[in-house]
Amino acid sequence: MSMLFSRFRLREMEFRNRVFVSPMCQYSSQDGMPNDWHLVHLGSRAVGGASLVMAEATAVSPEGRISPWDSGLWSSDHGKAFSRITAFIKSQGAVPGIQLAHAGRKASTDVPWRGERPLNEGASEWQPVDERSGGWRPIAPSPVPFGEHSPVPRELCSKDIGDILARFQDAARFSHDAGFEVLEIHMAHGYLLHEFLSPLSNRRTDEFGGTFENRIRFPLRVAEALRAVWPSRLPVFVRISCTDWVEGGWDFTQSIEFCRRLKEVGIDLIDCSSGGLVPYAKIPVRPGFQVPFAAAIRKEVDMPTGAVGLITEPVQAEQIVATGQADVVLLAREMLRQPYWPLHAAHALGADWVWPNQYQRARPR
């Protein structure tokens, strides 16, 4: 029997297989609102047989967006807009998930197909979010820009930090009201919570900077606060960058200890990615290059993990799960290329998997 297509349980949530759709930014929202594009994009992956369909990195506030066209969840209206998407995902037997995020110093950039250039890069003072003017000044733990041509972010004060924590909690409540059943906290890829973790981006001298204990303080508070407001029967994931791939930055030893703390506050699964904090990191990209992180955290911390990163072949995914390197695999770009990848993978692995009735005539025999 295929392990990839065996059931998986976290708390009271059961997943029909171990193929998850990773959050993938679509840069297709207006004022943070999901629309028909998101319904079709996410819905087709549910039809395609994935067990968890995770919506893109969704900002907890307008200034927390990577671009002015990111999705958001800072009001009940956003939750209502998402509700028809979650309802369709569930109708196809999949679980709807949401990744809550704040872009920090990497906010206010253009879309990738226009080069991701910083918007309003000349702004010297804090400006409210204004899509018509092209952007806003980003905020961060310290006034350290992301890249050579990035604006200097405004340093967060203690009140700002409290406000952002409240924003995350509000977004979690809106997520539940919208029908999402898995919550993931984005602490990776150089966005705000990762910026607190890494000494390369966190130069603070207060309780939120300096030592390891201080640098993990705010991300850990976010995790604890969201676990407290999210229903106890439903799981909470955290995505981390297991290493910055830069000497003197966040590394895997720190990730192991941080995951132990996340486990203590009730986090259910670690989504193991890497990089994204600085543009000059040298990352050894190759198929499965991040799987060892998931395997080590699963073993040393004794908690479920998800493996990500250039996982494209059914046999490759099966081997990761069957050998205990991770509990699940999260696919991103391959799911863009093949929304129905799980259906084809089940056939390739000889798993007895039911296709949607509407597609039965196309099922391989």
Image (cartoon, helix red, strand yellow):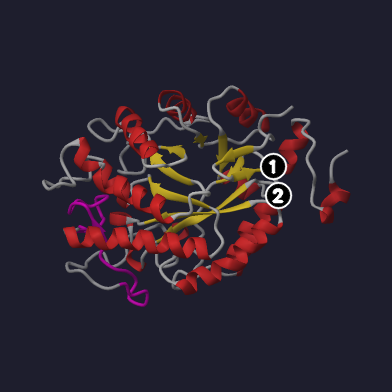
Image: magenta residue range? 129-155
Mark 1: amino acid: Pro
Q: Residues within 10 Å of mark 1 (few under 14, many from 20)?
A: many
Asked which secondary structure carries label 2, the reply is loop
Relative to 212, is 117 on the left or the right? right
Q: Which one is in front, 344 or 82? A: 82
Give residue 352's position: percent from left, percent from top: 80, 36
Mark 2: amino acid: Gly
Q: Which one is in front, 136 or 101? A: 101
Mark 1 and mark 2 residues within 8 Å of each other at the beta carbon: yes
Q: Is residue 54 above or below residue 254?
A: below
Give residue 203's position: percent from left, percent from top: 16, 45
Q: Residue at x 84, y 45 (%)?
A: 363
Q: Main secondary structure of the magenta part?
A: loop
Q: Is residue 178 above or below residue 193?
A: below
Q: Is residue 280 above or below residue 172?
A: above
- Can the viewer see residue 214? yes
Asked which secondary structure carries label 1, the reply is helix
Residue matched to label 1: 342
Q: Residues within 10 Å of mark 2 (few under 14, many from 20)?
A: many
Q: Is residue 354 above or below residue 175?
A: above
Would residue 137 be counted in the magenta stretch?
Answer: yes
Q: Residue at x 28, y 35 (%)?
A: 250
Relative to 76, is 106 on the left or the right? left
The quadrant of the rendering that contains the N terminus is top right
Residue matched to label 2: 48
Q: Residue at x 46, y 65 (%)?
A: 174
Would residue 131 be counted in the magenta stretch?
Answer: yes
